[in-house]
Image: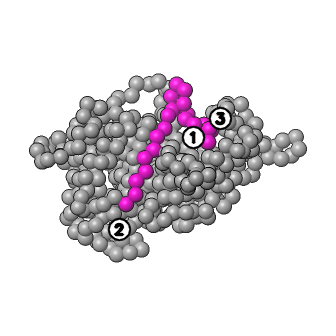
Amino acid sequence: MGSGESPLSGVPVPGAAGETRSSEIPFYGGHQGGIFEPRQRHTQFAAFDVVTSERSELTALLQRWTAVAADLTAGRAAGASSRSNAPGADSGEAIGLGAARLTVNFGFGPSLFGVGGRDRFGLLQRSPVPLVELPPFPGDQIPASTSGGDLTVHVCADDAQVAFHALRQLARSARPVAALRWTQAGFSSPGPDGGTPRNLLGFVDGTVNPTAKECETFVWVGEEGPEWMTGGTYMVVRRIRVDLDAWDATSIKDQEDVIGRHKSSGAPLGRTRQSDSLDLSARTSDGDPVIPLDAHVRLASAQANWGSMLLRRSFAFDDGLIGQGGSAGLDAGVLFICYQRYPVVGFIPIYRKLASADALSRFTTHTASAIAAVPAAASRHGDWVGRRLFED
């Protein structure tokens, strides 16, 4: 989505292909991790319900989560920095696996602020204006059990067990203050030589994403605030099931018309290289658009959406089978994750257009959803994520 790309998008690796990557990504700093860094191979996303009504217990949880995440991203056991000798301080399944470029970021959903409900923690007046509940979109099949969440956790790592271990430790340390609401694991493999990956539709995906400079305009919250969100961003998460059986029964030519790109090269229709820009005005000799009017890349492009861009960081998922017997099919698709500065002019209007007119929507169903405010990172040891929201 955004910039001519799909919600079935992965984030291309910034920098030169094959550049050296450290196994440890610093936890403390300006922005939370797992947003702009080179994308890892595995992810775990989780939404939590806060089950306490005590503000002090909520802030203690955020402090505890910050300390646990700082330990884990440094390759240490959870609780190592506190020298805890409590039974089961860390479950131990990641011993010796290292940091594996682990990142963890935390977000606050609208319900934490009491938007549309009860203001349990006195935060309603501090709710940021851009943090709105996502509206229903045509074709959504999202039950309440996989929608929303007071708190979000987005974990990424190059090792699947390291990613799972991190989410497991955070879930354990949340008790009894918060409980898991819904989760989703995902995976990704970069293309040859670290290039653009292919999604489960078989198309290269993630060719266009904002640069570091463009993120200052489209991703990171600036002086418009609120002050506690400066340096943060807003995250939208959608679990998108793809009808792979129907897709596989579609001809390559029709698939390319649906997407608007050549399947083999990744080039826009009518062009030769993956990096070539979209030419939405190009016509065939018969006068028809080279890129069909309902092609996914046309409707999602920056040209068609007032120049709006989203930072996409998505992963594939495979959850086994859905249905039974002869009607059973793969429950697989994409865990679409995007970060942006203004959801009301980013994801929401772009996806409203896609849901109603995109040719790709015939093959996709959205089955889970969340939106969250992701504040800036803890600045140093002793600081904690979200402190400015609660203490300013």
Rate crowding at label 1 as few (under 14), some (14 to 19) or many (20 or more) other CA atoms within 10 Å. Answer: many
Q: Under tag 2, what secondary structure? A: helix
Q: Name the kind of residue labelled 2 in the image.
A: Phe
- The Cα–Cα distance between marks 3 and 1, rounded to whole angstroms, is 12 Å
| Numbered badge on residue 266 | 3
Q: From the image, tell me which residue sits under label 2.
A: 113
Looking at the image, is mark 2 or mark 1 earlier in the sequence?
2
Rate crowding at label 3 as few (under 14), some (14 to 19) or many (20 or more) other CA atoms within 10 Å. Answer: many
Q: Which of 232/324 is in front?
A: 324
Looking at the image, is mark 3 or mark 2 earlier in the sequence?
2
Q: Give residue 112's position: percent from left, percent from top.
A: 34, 66
| Numbered badge on residue 199 | 1
Residue drawn at 42 percent across, 39 percent down = 42
Judge depth for marks 3 and 2 and give the one in front.
3
Judge depth for marks 2 and 1 and give the one in front.
1
Asked whether, in this view, residue 220 is left or right of residue 106, the answer is right
Region in magenta = 181-204
